[in-house]
Amino acid sequence: MTCYSALSSCVSASSLISIVTEPMLKEGHVKSLILVGLAFLSVLAGIHEQEAWAVNPSGYGQPGGEFDIRVRRVPASELAKAQAMKPPFEPTPEILAEGKEIFLGRGTCFRCHGQEGKGDGGAAKILPIKPRNFTNPKFMNYRTPGELMWVLKNGSLGQSGKVPGTGMLPIVGQFLSEEDGWKVILYEISLGQRKH
């Protein structure tokens, strides 16, 4: 078992294989496997810089704990531009259904965020940073759709300089079109608006 004391999390090789790689390989999701692996490595690579973060990342990796939802991933220099971005369509039932299909399918979002968007996907069990819980209704009080699109386009690799990145790599422009990215975002927003 390998432990990363800076993040108070431990990862065993058997967990990595059984939880993430086997299901992905069985289902033919080699891209997903590569994405999860790269995300995990990018998180580990950023651990040594944690002293520079404005917010103590010690809450990362704690069971059931989601990092402070008020802390932005978008750098201050790009925030106004990101916040100005708007979805090109309304969240109709058809758009939300398409977003869900992408989230659970080729977007591979569910691998980290879980089938219901609660941040409890298979990869969440081995990542030192808990993925976002989109069912948390408070989260959208602090985020605009444009900020979410910025993260889909740029990933969450610590660019804000305030907190370490989550390790999420860019998705839009790499694996999804911008239109599909907006559908996923509208679906994610809808998860926080449902009665649970």
Image: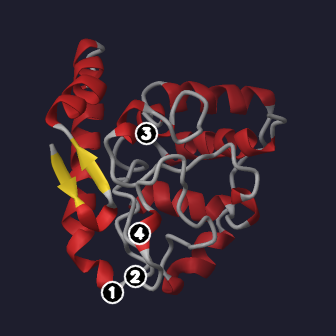
Q: Residue at x 59, y 40 (%)?
A: 184
Of mark 4 and mark 3, the one earlier in the sequence is 4
- Mark 2 and mark 3 residues within 8 Å of each other at the beta carbon: no
**Disc 1 versus disc 2: nearer the observer:** 1
Tell me the residue that label 2 is attached to. 161
Work out whether mark 2 precedes mark 3 in sequence or the reverse, and give the earlier one.
3
User: In terms of depth relative to the viewer, which is nearer, 67 or 78?
Assistant: 67
Q: Residue 11: x percent and y percent?
A: 23, 44
Q: Which residue is mark 4?
A: 58
- Residue type highlighted by circle 1: Ala
- Choose mark 4 or mark 1, whichever is in front: 4
Q: CB under 8 Å between callouts 3 and 1?
A: no
Q: Earlier in the sequence, mark 4 or mark 1?
A: 1
Q: Are marks 4 and 3 in contact (CB under 8 Å)?
A: no
Q: Secondary structure at mark 4?
A: helix
Earlier-in-chain disc, 3 versus 1: 1
Q: Amino acid at mark 3?
A: Cys
Label 3 to label 1, Cα distance in Å? 26 Å
Instruction: Tell me residue 15's x, y (percent).
Output: 24, 31
* Residue at the spot of label 1: 52
Q: Is residue 168 above or below residue 25?
A: below
Indicate the amino acid at tag 4: Ser
Query: Is the residue marked by circle 4 packed among few (<14), some (14-19), or many (20+) residues within 10 Å?
Result: some
Rate crowding at label 2 as few (under 14), some (14 to 19) or many (20 or more) other CA atoms within 10 Å: some
Q: Are marks 4 and 1 in contact (CB under 8 Å)?
A: no
The residue drawn where x is 43% and y is 49% is 172
